[in-house]
Image: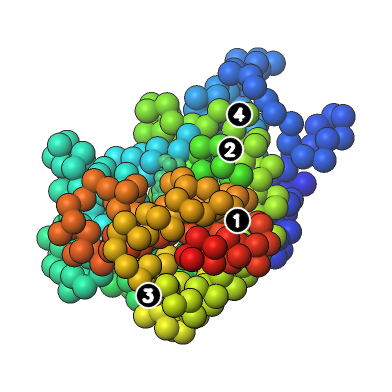
Amino acid sequence: MSAPTQNSLATRCVHAGERTDPHGSPHTPIYTTTTFAFPSTAALLDVVEGRVAGSLYTRYGLNPSILALEEKLAALEGAEAALAFSSGMAAESALFFAHGRDGIVCIGDAYGGTLELIGQQLPLLGMPTHLLLGHELEQLDRLLAEGARLVFLETPTNPALEVFDIAALAEQVHARGALLVVDNTFASPVNQQPLALGADLVVHSATKYLGGHSDLTAGALMGARALLDPVWNWRKNLGQMPAPETAALLARSLRSLVVRVRQQSASALVVARAMEVHPRVARVLYPGLPSCPGHALATRQMSGFGGMLTIEIAGDGAAATAVADRLELFALAPSLGGVESLVTQPCTTTHHGLTPEERARRGISDAMLRLSIGLEDAEDLIADLHLALG
Ligand SMILES: *Cc1c(COP(=O)(O)O)cnc(C)c1O
């Protein structure tokens, strides 16, 4: 029942990768099995030696629930292949071990775990890594000339919603023979297709929009099979595959990805517009607003502006904390992309580990609140924000 990738995204979300069974299940059953039996040694060797695709051992990812999920994940990003992981950070670390040993450049703000892994932990293993902010991009070409082979970025970024030009960066990075990897967690495949814009690989924290219900932890990497093969070996021996139960739960969630994210993006725009005219809000960062510096580029490179926005309260960090604490519908929690709306104050969570000077250098003020818009009615969310803002 696997669907050709020329089907629209919504159709691929429902049908891609699904395997039926002898009972006529309309989607792939959960295979909790750790190992798979063969009728003969010859048939076993066909799988072990790669002549025949098949199930073998679950830690290898060779399990029908995981393989079916990977077919669906590949179809979402228009990729030749995909690998599923136990978390977004598992996907990133296996990727960096496989392709980052000659040097990694991370552009712009990124997820805290990504910055820690690239900035602090990989250098302990002797891997040369560099963190460049958006205004330091002129250094990229020199770092590529010096041997960096992997360029990694998020767009839009967290929490400032800065937008980077994927097609232009792909051209620059490819001219030096390096790889461009986009963390597409914030936009989701519904709003942005990095591979079509020229990126080589896409990584996801599937914990966020792909899972979409704040009830599973997983990751994904999509791209050409030749680029994924070396990552597969790292995943296998670091033991980073998702459990079959999680793989099946994620595939279940992906069937509704398009309707969820389209609604979340539409509601985020309504909330952003309401916040933009509120006297106690100094600034709204949302790529869908013409006032946002990344708006023109986002309009070109995205098909929707996503469900994440950041508001800056008119006042100090304590004023923003008071607003966050008064919200009722928005749960005070890190993470994003679920059906329930969440609020976080970056200086107390995602960027708590940075000094105030480093936060300022990254354009993150203590008065910022990051909102992840869920599937509640947008007017109810606005009413909650109005009450909290006072
Ligand atoms: C959450 C997140 C990650 C890490 O994903 P986990 O599933 O928590 O390991 C990576 N990148 C982005 C943009 C994220 O939001």
Per the model, the C-alpha gap separating discs 4 and 3 is 46 Å
Per the model, the C-alpha gap separating discs 3 and 1 is 23 Å
Residues packed near mark 3 inside 10 Å, few (<14), some (14 to 19) or many (20 plus): some
At 58% across and 18% down in the image, what residue appears? 34
Residue depth check, mark 3 versus mark 2: number of the one nearer the observer: 3
Choose between 50 and 286: the one closer to the eye.
286
Which is more N-terminal, label 3 or label 4?
Answer: 4
Residue depth check, mark 3 versus mark 1: number of the one nearer the observer: 3
Which is more N-terminal, label 4 or label 2?
Answer: 2
Q: Is residue 149 visible?
A: no
At 17% across and 36% down in the image, what residue appears? 125
CB atoms at circles 1 and 2 under 8 Å apart? no
Amino acid type assigned to the residue bearing label 3 in the image: Ala
Measured from the top left, where is residue 20 in percent x and y?
79, 37
Q: Which residue is mark 3?
A: 282
Residues packed near mark 1 inside 10 Å, few (<14), some (14 to 19) or many (20 plus): many
Per the model, the C-alpha gap separating discs 1 and 4 is 27 Å
Q: Which residue is mark 2?
A: 215
- Rendered view: 376 above or below 251: below
Residue 374 — which label? Answer: 1
Which is more N-terminal, label 2 or label 3?
Answer: 2
Residue depth check, mark 4 versus mark 3: number of the one nearer the observer: 3
Amino acid type assigned to the residue bearing label 1 in the image: Gly
Residue 244 — which label? Answer: 4
Total residue callouts = 4
Q: Is residue 68 visible?
A: yes
Measured from the top left, where is residue 217 in percent x and y?
51, 37
Residue depth check, mark 1 versus mark 2: number of the one nearer the observer: 1
